[in-house]
Each structure stands twice: as C-alpha cells, then as structure tokens.
Image (spheres, rainbow, N blue to C red):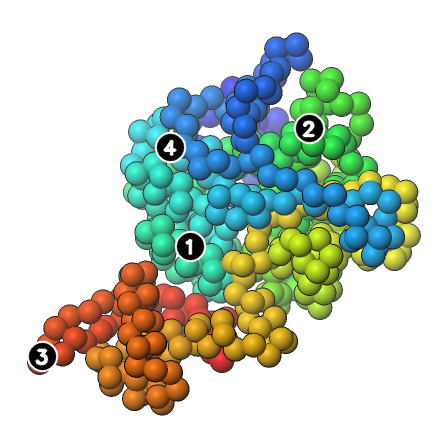
Amino acid sequence: MKLQCIRCGTQFSINPIRSHCAKCGGTLEYVADLPAVDAVNFCGLQGLWRYKQLLPAVQHVVSLGEGGTPLHKADRLAKAVGLKTLYLKDETRSPTNSYRDRAASLLTSNALDLGFKALVSASNGNMGASLAAYCAKAGLICHVIVPKVVDVGKLAQMLAYDAIIEEKGDIVDDSICRARAEAEETGWYQATAELNPYVVEAQKTIAYEIFEQFGVPEWLLVPMGSGGTIYSLWKGFKELKQLDLISELPKMVGIQPEGCASIVNFVNLGNLGSEKVCSGATRALAILVGEPLQSDLAVKAVSESNGLALTVSDPEIFAAELQIAKLEGVFAEPASSTTAAALKKLMEEGTIPKDSSAVCLITGSGLKATDVLQAITKKQKTAGLGLEISTKQKILGILSREDAYGYDLWKQLGKIVTRAAVYQHLNELAEKGLIAGYEANGRRFFKITEHGKRALAAFDDLKLLM
C-alpha cells in the first residue's frame, strides 16, 4: 500500500495523510495490489462495505448503511432527450442524501483506526453534512469550515449533527486553505475531500455498483467541482477491467456550470494549471470551485476514456432539475442536474448516438438546496413552506438585534401569525440550538446563539427572506 503521484510516479507512505506530491505538485492516489480475480467475492455484505476487499483496510467500520443506492431506468427522460437507454445512479438515497456518505464512512473509520479524536474538513455542503453525521455515530469531534455561500439545507444538517462550524472565504477554495492550516496546527485528522486520497477510494464503489446493477454504460456523466469525483468512477471501472470482470470502459463526461468552468477550460483549451475560470455566478453551489485541486485527476479521466468536458448554463440546470423530478420522480440538487442538462445538449448536437447507453450520476438531493425549494414554492404560489422559513428567519433577525419575549416578538412580527405559532417556532428554533431561553423580570426571554447567527447569515446570503 502506498501513495503515488499521478504525474511523476513518486511514491510516499500512506501515513501521514497527504494529497499532493512534494516533488512536482501532482495529485497523489492510493495504490494497492488488487486481489486475484478468483479471490474477489462481493457476496454477503451490502452497500459500500460489500467491496471491502478493494478498499483500504480498516478495523473500526463506521457505517450508517451507505452505498447500495438504486440505479433507476429512466425511460421517460430517455424518450424526452432521444436516447435509447438511460439510467440515473441515485445517491440521494444515501443516509444523509448524498454520495459523500461513502467517503465519510471510510474516513471516519480510518480516523478511529489511527487514534484521532477530532477531524477537520473544508466543505461547500455535502461532505460537511456527511462527516458531521458519521462523526456523531463514531463519537468524534467534527470541525467543518464552510464558505460564505452554502446551501442552507446542508448547513442545517451540520448543525443538527452538532458539528463545529467555522466560516472562511467566499467560496470553498478559501475554506480548504484554512482546513489545511488547522490540521497542521492542531493535529486533527484531515478529512477535506481534496486533501485525503481515501475519498477517491470510497467513491470508486459507485462504479462497482453500476457494473453489478447494469454493466458498463457507453457514456457516464458526472458533475465536476474539484475534479476528484469523475476520477473516482473512472478508477473504479479501470479496476474492474484489471480484474478481468469487464472488457470495455465507459466514456467519461465531466460537466461544470458556465459560471465556474476551470476544468472544462483545461480540457478543451489545453492550459492545465494556468488561467482559472470562475466568476462564482452559479446556483450549483456543490461544484462552485475556483481553483480545483484535483483538476489533473479529472483531466486524466476524460482524456484516458476519450470522453468529453462541457458546460451548462444555470437556466439549463434548473430546467433539467424540474425535468428529472417530473419525469422520473428523483429530486436532484442543481449540481447533480448538470448531468441531465449536459445529456440533453449532447443529444441535440448529435454527439451521443441515439442508440447509446448512458448513466447520469445524481450526487445529492434537491431537498438540501433550499433556494431551489423557494423558487418552486414561488412558482406554484404556495406560501406554506416559504412562510415557515420566513417566520423563523424574521424571529432570528429580531433576536440578532435584541433579546425579546414571546408576546413582544408576536407584535414585532406584525401579528401575521398566531401567538401559538410564534411559540411553536421558538420551541423549534431552541431545539435546533439556534436560540436559547432565560428568565428575567418574570418573563421568558430568548436570545440568538452563535449557531443561530451563522444560520441567519446563511439565510441572508441566499436571499431566503420572503
């Protein structure tokens, strides 16, 4: 077992954890001898740990039932875009509703094996939510560093799982720098996806499952942020070929939003490592990365597979999100919906033949992207969810200025809801740790907590006020 640079081939020991080559700066990947094909046995276990033989060895397995997600045959969506065979690999069915649960399971298991008590991760959403849940299961302290703009649904998950949250920077690039420094200073386990090679190892199991559920698709469409995810699936299929379990490999298609397309620019213009292309103007926050640290992995996956890299616009993403939901009953987050948007574009261009087979990776649930929920709510002209979110936000806003008691809050809200509803909101906010109550002058006052201030800031940043 070793870490090896994908550029210069320099090898390093697997401990301490490191992500990039000290010699040339290339990305390191975990390398181990594969077992003999006749020794591979996927029977017995379910989910991620079904593939334990092909994963880094661990003694303490932390699991919430990750992996084993469905592969939906998407006949109606296939017909709409003009493709013969289409499947959706639905990672929204994971324990915390995203594919990052696979990595969180392996990383927390490894952290326990190595004797760590705390870990740190920079995340723009899904990874932080997953790690917070698995740390709660394992009894580890979870530090998550998030950028200024993050999906509120994912932030809510982190808060519920009792993660310690710190904000750093406008996008995740700045958060990654902070996480790197904090791990070096404190000795915490480094669980940032871009800085831990075990993440690729966990995520490659998605390819194993697609193989067992369907076989090898001709085209495999994957969203790209830092670049590690598309390489994870490519590595999984390559290992299956090395084991002589398959004879063909899929063409990998990497997709980024127009507002943040550094890797696509690298692939199509051949200027890897030079100009960075990211205006930050996209609703696909899960793949909003300015300087992708694993871009060389993504380029390797696309080039070795004779695949493609392309961008889609935010209107195309939103249209695809609604189309996936309406036609196939899968509510995907914006980053995931880039795959369906790209497929539609490639079919219209004639790039993908109509008689082909394709799989779109759906990385996370649309329930995490609350700006999408608001857009749908406004479109349908239903105020139920929006009013509840707005009321809670307004209460937090009032308490951020001064402490208040229930009746006073009801008056400041303009008496637009009943007093009973106000107290219900207060109880729910207190249960989430966003506010705290105390007795003074014969009344029960409420004050906003630090968690509450962060949640309010996230609401404001995403413009969730109704």
Tell me the quarter of the picture where residue 397 sits. bottom left
Q: Is residue 196 visible?
A: no
Q: Is residue 342 left or right of residue 190?
A: right
Q: Secondary structure at mark 2?
A: helix
Query: Which amino acid, mark 4?
Result: Ala
Instruction: Kindly identify which numbered label has been placed on residue 111.
Output: 4
**Label 4: which secondary element:** helix
The answer to which of 73 and 296 lies nearer the viewer is 73
C-alpha separation, residue under disc 3 versus residue under disc 1:
35 Å
Mark 1: amino acid: Gln
* Residue designated by label 2: 212
Q: Which mark is residue 157?
A: 1
- Specify the amino acid type for callout 3: Gly
Distance between the alpha carbons at the discs numbered 4 and 3: 49 Å
Report whether residue 357 is seen.
yes
Instruction: Using a 10 Å C-alpha cutoff, classify the residue at mark 3 as few (fewer than 14 neighbours), some (14 to 19) or many (20 or more).
Output: few
Local packing at callout 4 (Cα closer than 10 Å; few below 14, some 14-19, many 20+) is: many
Q: Disc 3 on helix, strand or loop?
A: loop
Which circle marks residue 37 in the picture? none
Q: Which mark is nearer the camera, 4 or 1? A: 1
Name the residue rendered at 40%, 40% in the picture: 134
Q: Position of residue 284 (x, y in %)?
A: 61, 60
Sequence-wise, the earlier of marks 3 and 1 is: 1
Q: Is residue 394 above or below residue 199?
A: below
Q: Which residue is mark 3?
A: 442
